[in-house]
Image: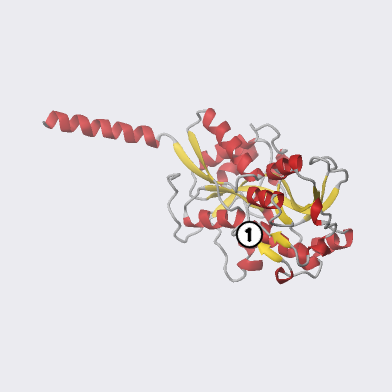
Amino acid sequence: MKHFFFTAVLASAFLCACDNSQDRISLGSGNAGGVYYKFANEYAQTINANNNGLNIVVKATAGTKGNMRLLKQGFVDIAIVQGDILKDALFGNGEYYNNKIGTNFAAIGALHAEAVQIVVSEKSGITSIQELIGKRVSIGEEESGVIRNAKIILDAYGISFEDIKIENLGFNESATALKNGKIDAFFCTAGIPTPAISELSKTNAIKILSIDSTDLKRIERQHSEFTAMEIPEGTYNNQEQGVNTIGMKAILIANLDVEKATAYKLASSIFELQGHPALDFATTSVPAKFHEGAAEFYASKGITVATAKKQSFKTSNISTGD
């Protein structure tokens, strides 16, 4: 009996050792139909296939704001966020005024540029942002960064949320609602081309609204985290002209409780992906300081970045990926 008990304990210890040999990292992505979700799954597949001791588990979320909250609460270990929302959270601006989300996280690297896209149905007859007044408009899913972007753009045109009929839908849900005539327009902040919009443009006549140059300049002056962008002609089916809009960087961030060696692997793995960003893009104009593991990787490439230090306040434990 004692022999059986000892064997069982030994086997249990062996299994635990095997489980602990692989870091299970939970990644907060975004809603299906967006580039965050697409990137997260490609990133996870690349890392997991390399058998380098990491197991990335992708979590579909509402987007940036949800990811910031989940990271703070310890439900995810790494997350993709919009650069403008990240900046607000770090410096206590906007809706984070007097309510900083905390700074026990750091950057792994900027991933790609993303654009604010305002999609309308051709049937709606809407040709300008001003014509959104009184229309049914999805301004993004709750806890997404899209809502803030929609507000900023509408404010530039003297339009408030009270002037439109608001819906809070994710990208796929917005595309379906537009297709079925349940909404007239939707806001979408994502890398281009955005899968949900691409699929919609194959079956429905749509238009992406441009932001007037004067309003673009005003937004850039008031919100330095944004930059003017163009959605090139032909990005979507039957898109015959380029579209002027604002954009920002999508950034991968990590809880500072993530081990240094793990953060090094997370940073290096970005550049194993097809269509990966340039090193300069990944390390410049990033509001947050970098995780020391990521900083070590960039140093190996001859790039020096500011390194974040762990805060003294108590933080949640690293998640199990469940």
* Residue 264 position within the rendered picture, expressed as x and y whole percent measured from the top left: 56, 39
Q: Say which quadrant the N terminus sits in.
A: top left
Outermost residue on the left side: it is: 1
Q: Estimate the x, y position of residue 143 in percent, counting from the top left.
A: 59, 59
Asked whether residue 5 is in view, the answer is: yes
Comparing 224 with 288, the one in front is 224
In this rendered view, identify the residue nearer to me: 225 or 42: 42
Quadrant showing the C terminus: top left
Height in image: 68 above or below 232?
A: below
Which residue corresponds to the image point at 63% horizontal and 40% vertical from the top-left?
Answer: 38
User: Residue 206, relative to residue 13: is it above or below?
Assistant: below
What is the x, y in percent for residue 234?
Answer: 83, 40
Q: Position of residue 169 (x, y in %)?
A: 63, 55
Kindly indicate the quadrant of the structure image that contains residue 101.
bottom right
In the rendered image, which quarter is residue 109 located in?
top right
Res 93 visible: no
- Mark 1 crowd level (few <14, some 14–19, many ≥20, 10 Å Cα): some
Q: Is residue 96 left or right of residue 9?
A: right
Q: Residue at x 88, y 62 (%)?
A: 214
Q: Position of 62 compared to 230: left or right?
A: left
User: Residue 16 sits in which quadrant?
Assistant: top left
The secondary element bearing badge 1 is classed as: loop
Badge count: 1
Reply above or below: 3 against 140: above
- Of the residues shown, which amino acid type is indicated by label 1? Asn
Answer with left or right where residue 201 lies relative to residue 176.
right
Residue at 76% over, 56% down? 226
Residue beneath disc 1:
168
In this picture, residue 105 sits left or right of residue 161 = left
